[in-house]
Amino acid sequence: MSLDFERDVTELENQIAAIERQTRRDDEEESRLRDLRLARVEKLRETYANLSSWQTVQVARHKNRPYTKDYLHLAFDEFVELHGDKFFGDDRAMLSGFAKIDRFKVMVLGHQKGRTYKERAACHFGCAHPEGYRKAMLKMRMAEKYHLPLICFIDTPGAYPGVGAEERGQAQVIAESMFLMSRLRTPIVCVVIGEGGSGGALGIGVGDRVAMLENSYYSVISPEGCAGILWKSHEFASKAAEALRFTAKDLSGFGVIDDVISEPLGGAHRDHHQMATRLKSYLSATLEDLESTPTDELLEARYDKFRRMGIYLDAAVTA
C-alpha cells in the first residue's frame, strides 16, 4: 500500500523491482539499478522531511505499520499475555501481560488493532471498551505489587463510542485509569506508536516518560471529528490536522511529551525490525534512568509534569 504523496517513490520502487526480476543483467542495467536505489533514498528523505500534519496522520494509520503485538515479538525477549477484567470479559483491543526486555522484567499494556479484517473486527479497530481499561487497571495494580515497571503502547483512534460501552461506564473508567496511573508506585513509560486519539489514548497515557514515534500523532480528537464539528464536513480533515498541532514535533515543543523516537527512512512500516531495535534501545535507556529515582521523587515529578501542561498567559487587549 502506497500513500498519495509517495507516488514518486512508488514509481522508483517499481522500476527497481522490474530490473531485480531479471535473471541476467548487464553492466548498464546494474549501473541503472544503483542510480535508482540512490534516487529512491533521496526521494524518501526529501518526502519524509517535509510531511504535513495530514500526511503524518496517513503514515500513523498505515496498514503495514507495526502494532503492539509486533513490538512484543521483535523488541521483547519474553511475553506472557494476561486476560480479562474479572467483571465483564476480555477486550482484545487492549493487550496486557508480563514481559522481559534486556535485564528488566516489566508489565506491558497496549492497544491492538489487528492486521486482517477479521482481527480488526475482533479488536474493534483498536478502540477499547470499559473492560479493556478495567483489565489495564488490574494489571497496573499487579505491576505495582510486584515492583515491575509499566510500559504502555498507545495506538488507538479513541475509546469505543458505542452505547454498550457508555452503559458500562466508559468515561468513568478512563478517568479512574488516569487517576490510578498518576499515583502508581512504579515507573511508567508511555509511547505513542501510531494514533493517539482522545480519552482512549489518555486512559493509558499518564507516565513518567511520554514519548512518540516520529510519524505518530497525539490529539484530543481525530482530524475528521474536529472537521465534522467545526466545518460540518470530513472534507476539511487536512485543515483540521494543521490546526490541531498534534505531531511529535509540535507536542515536543509544547512540553506535552518528553521524547521523539526517530523512525527508519520512509516510516516504521518500511522496516519493522529497525523500528523495534530503536524502540528497544529507548525503553532500555529510559528504564535504566527511572530505576535509580526514588519512588516518592518519581511520583512528585510525575504530578508536576502533568500540572505544567496547558499553562497560558492572560494579556490585556489594547485597541
Image (cartoon, rainbow, N blue to C red):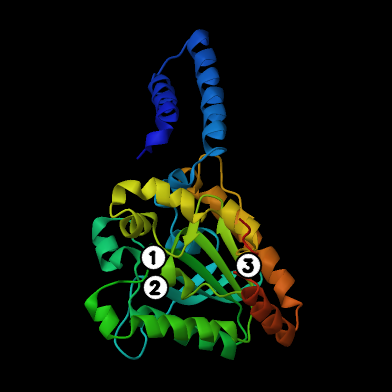
The amino acid marked with disc number 3 is: Tyr
Tell me: 296 left or right of 152. Answer: right
Closer to the camera in the image, 194 or 53: 53
Quickly name the residue at label 1: 112
Rendering coords of residue 260 (x, y %): 62, 55
Classify mark 2: residues with Cα within 10 Å, few (<14), some (14-19) or many (20+). many
Relative height, residue 290 to residue 318 (above, below): below
**For the C terminus, which image quadrant?**
bottom right
* Residue displayed at 55% across by 30% down: 41
The amino acid marked with disc number 1 is: Gln
> Is residue 27 at all visible to an observer of this figure?
yes
The amino acid marked with disc number 2 is: Met
Q: CA distance from mark 2 to mark 3?
A: 35 Å
Quickly name the residue at label 3: 312
Relative height, residue 34 to residue 308 (above, below): above
Relative height, residue 272 to residue 39 (above, below): below
Q: CA distance from mark 1 to mark 2?
A: 6 Å
Rendering coords of residue 66 (x, y %): 45, 54
Q: Earlier in the sequence, mark 1 or mark 2?
A: 2
Q: Quadrant of residue 127?
A: bottom left
For residue 94, the mark is 2
Classify mark 3: residues with Cα within 10 Å, few (<14), some (14-19) or many (20+). few
Tell me: 4 left or right of 245. Answer: left
Q: Earlier in the sequence, mark 3 or mark 1?
A: 1
